[in-house]
């Protein structure tokens, strides 16, 4: 006989479960919702009375000034390298945790995912008698699974009470870098589980009565390689939010609670209304794009990021189904909160840069993914190098939305090709020349080439793809703090161009070594060495593929001491082709490299990349081709071969008639190579991915997901994705060597018979 629980029993059971929750993990109701909340009772009350738009505009200006002031405090006083280069942000949130206003500089994405942990705090700690949310409290957070970009970013969040009532939240976030992960610098490519990723701080209280709790500070310092950095920047972020709090209270004292609450809410709702209007301007339809990552940072693997952007009325849907499955033991997974924050950045950088940066930019945008895909993985999946798919997501909207925008009579910015989308920098760790342990990353990450525009070339090394208001730092300051010596820095990389009617902005070379440290090493977190990272637009070329080059087994300082003219110029191409340092081992590898020790004087060389090109190369003005030659951005070989320009190599004077004739002849040659679409498909399209290519993602059907690697060939339904477990590259290498030994032994045995 089945026993039924009474209503009283059910109430008792719910009470027991609520009071005895085993673990407050990331809350799907919070982390899967990027839209602004419905109005609170307080907001309804305020808006029902009406808000003076002129006063609201005035208050917005004061808040912006306060955010800028707090940003500058962190920028000037922060210990982390990222703080000095603008890898930070300050922000103001409503009482219920919606992101309302962001500093007019810094990293939008840091703030655009900080509302997730604030919502977590409100939901779980407000009424918890062991925690609580009170005036003078401050909460810290870095675990991206609860909302964030990645675990190197640490946020300080503070509730702001006025006359006993919670009216808003303020925050400050810095890319700290070092966080105690299995590799120094905070972004371990070698992480095989989330337990290799170092600090994973779910939102918890670290400040009471405006003072840091020293017991927790000591615990956090003891968990990282750079305790000085951890303490100093916790103090810096705390005092920045306290200064921001003071400025907001002065607004409350002058204008009243209703004026502030109404301004914060209307700021979001006005943006939401404008976004709805702008989407409605776009033609209804669907635009598709496929992007690929070519590395897990430990092996070559072609991972698809599929996207179909659909506009219908005032709603936009981003459908990422068909994307690569998650990896169970590779750190290149990216949770959906991080990925969504990247999309907000792209919206504000490449589509609607005139809109105020706020969470409401995405309120009319719906995101669809496959569960257990690389951009929506399960919580146990490692994601320390989430930047790989995240940066792809950052630019994934650029081509589709520029195709939608192209036909509009009024645009809000230039039509633009995608920016270079890789974290092309050196991550480091070890003992400095001063004997201090450290680990972090170099500011070269902040110099990605801009995509070409519909009316002009892209800007060289203008900003990181994840933040359009950052600097590349001063190498002299870095060399004072670390043993890294720059043999070549920020020299534009000749010929590594994305070609087109307008070319993409170019990246720079980075050539570094180490001196005066007995324990130092480098790693990189970058892909795009086999498959170009960034696509062109409307016929423009993709950027090239880039490699990591090394010169090992020598000390370049000894070489230069003995022969100062041994190396005429530190240029990657010349060094690798001419090999002027005798006795050295020269290697060219994929850009992804796990941490490895570097002896004094050994050289590591990487290159920032180019943004995508725009338009047909045969439409490029010959004068612009000559300008690139004059500025030594391009070789004569490529000027003739790609742009088909006839000119005098000595004077750079163009033969206009001969150029017109040559280009016309090449157009005729193109036509002669052309074939009907069906014939092209018959020759090139295959029913399944080739078996000799490590391939992850859909092929021609987004509901069928492939996972092909070595002897593994899985084909899965998209709703039944199984995570991929990759072999350790060392085990693979050992197996290859053992097979080679067996082969040689067999040959030796045959020869002795």
Image (spheres, rainbow, N blue to C red):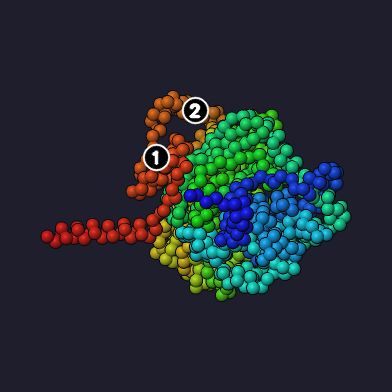
Q: Is residue 186 visible?
A: yes
Q: Residue furthest left?
A: 753
Residue lying at 59% horizontally and 52% vertically, measured from the top left: 6
Work out which residue is located at the far bottom of the displayed protein and give it: 435
Of residues 522 and 213, the one nearer the viewer is: 213
Residue 148, by quadrant, is bottom right
Q: Which mark is residue 667?
A: 2
In terms of depth relative to the viewer, which is nearer, 60 or 464? 60
* Neighbour tally class for label 1: few under 14, some 14-19, many 20 plus, Cα within 10 Å: some
Percent x, y for residue 323? Answer: 49, 43
Name the residue beneath numbered marker 1: 689
Residue 748 located left or right of residue 416: left
Helix, strand or loop status at disc 1: loop
Does 314 sit above or below residue 710? above
Taking the image as shown, residue 641 lies to the left or right of residue 113, namely left
Q: Nearer the viewer, residue 600 or 350?
A: 350
Left or right: where 684 falls relative to 199: left
In the rendering, at what x and y percent does residue 748 appear? Answer: 18, 60
Question: What kind of element bears circle 2?
Answer: helix
In the rendered image, which quarter is residue 538 located in? top right
Q: Looking at the image, tell me whether mark 2 or mark 1 is earlier in sequence order.
A: 2
**Residue 116 picture location, percent across and down:** 64, 53
Residue 444 shows up from this direction: no
Q: In the image, is residue 723 above or below residue 441?
A: above
Work out whether residue 316 or residue 65 is closer to the camera in this orientation and state it. Answer: 316
298 displayed left or right of 227: left
Q: Position of residue 47 (x, y in %)?
A: 81, 44
Residue count near mark 2 (Cα–Cα under 10 Å), binned few <14, some 14–19, many ≥20: few
Residue at horizontal 50%, vertical 29%? Answer: 662
Identify the residue at horizontal 84%, vertical 58% (top origin).
250
């Amino acid at each position: 006989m089945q026993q039924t629980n009474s209503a009283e029993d059910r109430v008792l059971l719910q009470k027991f479960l609520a009071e005895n929750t085993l673990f407050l993990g990331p809350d799907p109701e919070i982390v899967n919702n990027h839209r602004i909340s419905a109005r609170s009772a307080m907001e309804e009350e305020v808006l029902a009375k009406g808000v003076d738009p002129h006063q609201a505009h005035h208050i917005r200006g004061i808040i912006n000034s306060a955010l800028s002031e707090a940003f500058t405090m962190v920028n000037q006083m922060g210990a982390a390298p990222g703080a000095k280069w603008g890898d930070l942000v300050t922000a103001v949130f409503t009482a219920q945790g919606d992101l309302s206003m962001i500093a007019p500089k810094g990293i939008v994405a840091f703030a655009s995912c900080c509302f997730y942990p604030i919502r977590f705090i409100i939901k779980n700690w407000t009424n918890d008698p062991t925690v609580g949310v009170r005036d003078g409290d401050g909460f810290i957070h870095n675990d991206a699974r609860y909302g964030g970009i990645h675990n190197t970013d640490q946020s300080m969040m503070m509730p702001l009470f006025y006359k006993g009532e919670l009216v808003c939240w303020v925050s400050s976030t810095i890319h700290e870098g070092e966080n105690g992960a299995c590799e120094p610098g905070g972004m371990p490519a070698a992480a095989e589980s989330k337990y290799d990723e170092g600090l994973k701080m779910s939102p918890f209280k670290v400040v009471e009565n405006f003072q840091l709790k020293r017991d927790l500070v000591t615990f956090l310092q003891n968990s990282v390689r750079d305790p000085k950095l951890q303490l100093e920047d916790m103090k810096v972020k705390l005092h920045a939010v306290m200064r921001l709090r003071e400025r907001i209270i002065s607004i409350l004292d002058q204008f009243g609670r209703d004026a502030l609450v109404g301004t914060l809410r209307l700021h979001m709702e006005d943006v939401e209304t404008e976004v709805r209007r702008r989407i409605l301007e776009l033609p209804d339809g669907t635009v598709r794009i496929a992007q690929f990552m070519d590395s897990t940072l430990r092996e070559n693997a072609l991972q698809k990021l599929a996207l179909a952007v659909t506009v219908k009325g005032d709603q936009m849907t981003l459908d990422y189904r068909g994307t690569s499955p998650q990896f169970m033991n590779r750190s290149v997974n990216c949770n959906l909160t991080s990925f969504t924050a990247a999309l907000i950045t792209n919206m504000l950088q490449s589509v609607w840069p005139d809109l105020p940066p706020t969470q409401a930019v995405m309120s009319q945008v719906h995101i669809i993914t496959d569960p257990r895909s690389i951009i929506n993985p399960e919580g146990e999946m490692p994601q320390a190098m989430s930047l790989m798919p995240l940066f792809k997501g950052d630019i994934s909207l650029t081509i589709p939305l520029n195709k939608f925008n192209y036909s509009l009579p009024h645009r809000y910015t230039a039509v633009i090709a995608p920016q270079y989308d890789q974290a092309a920098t050196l991550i480091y760790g070890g003992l400095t020349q001063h004997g201090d342990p450290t680990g972090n990353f170099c500011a070269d990450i902040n110099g990605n080439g801009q995509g070409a525009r519909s009316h002009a070339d892209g800007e060289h090394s203008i900003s990181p793809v994840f933040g359009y208001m950052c600097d590349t730092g001063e190498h002299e300051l870095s060399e004072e703090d670390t043993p890294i010596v720059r043999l070549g820095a920020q020299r534009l990389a000749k010929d590594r161009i994305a070609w087109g009617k307008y070319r993409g902005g170019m990246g720079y070379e980075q050539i570094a070594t180490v001196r005066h440290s007995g324990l130092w090493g480098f790693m990189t977190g970058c892909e795009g060495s086999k498959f170009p990272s960034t696509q062109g637009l409307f016929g423009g070329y993709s950027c090239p593929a880039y490699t990591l080059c090394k010169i090992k087994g020598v000390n370049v300082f000894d070489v230069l001491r003995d022969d100062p003219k041994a190396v005429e110029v530190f240029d990657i191409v010349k060094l690798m082709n001419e090999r002027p340092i005798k006795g050295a081992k020269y290697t060219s590898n994929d850009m992804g490299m796990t941490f490895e020790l570097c002896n004094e004087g050994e050289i590591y060389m990487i290159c920032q990349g180019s943004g995508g090109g725009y338009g047909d190369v045969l439409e490029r003005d010959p004068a612009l081709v000559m300008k690139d030659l004059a500025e030594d951005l391009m070789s004569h070989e490529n000027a003739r071969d790609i742009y088909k320009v006839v000119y005098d190599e000595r004077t750079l004077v163009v033969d206009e008639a001969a150029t017109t004739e040559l280009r016309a002849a090449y157009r005729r040659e193109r036509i002669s190579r052309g074939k009907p679409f069906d014939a092209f498909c018959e020759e090139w399209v295959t029913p399944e991915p080739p078996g000799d290519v490590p391939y992850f993602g859909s092929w021609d059907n987004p509901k069928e997901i492939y996972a092909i690697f070595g002897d593994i060939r899985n084909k899965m339904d998209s709703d039944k994705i199984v995570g991929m477990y990759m072999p350790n590259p060392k085990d693979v290498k050992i197996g290859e060597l053992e097979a080679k030994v067996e082969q040689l032994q067999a040959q030796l045995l045959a020869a002795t018979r």
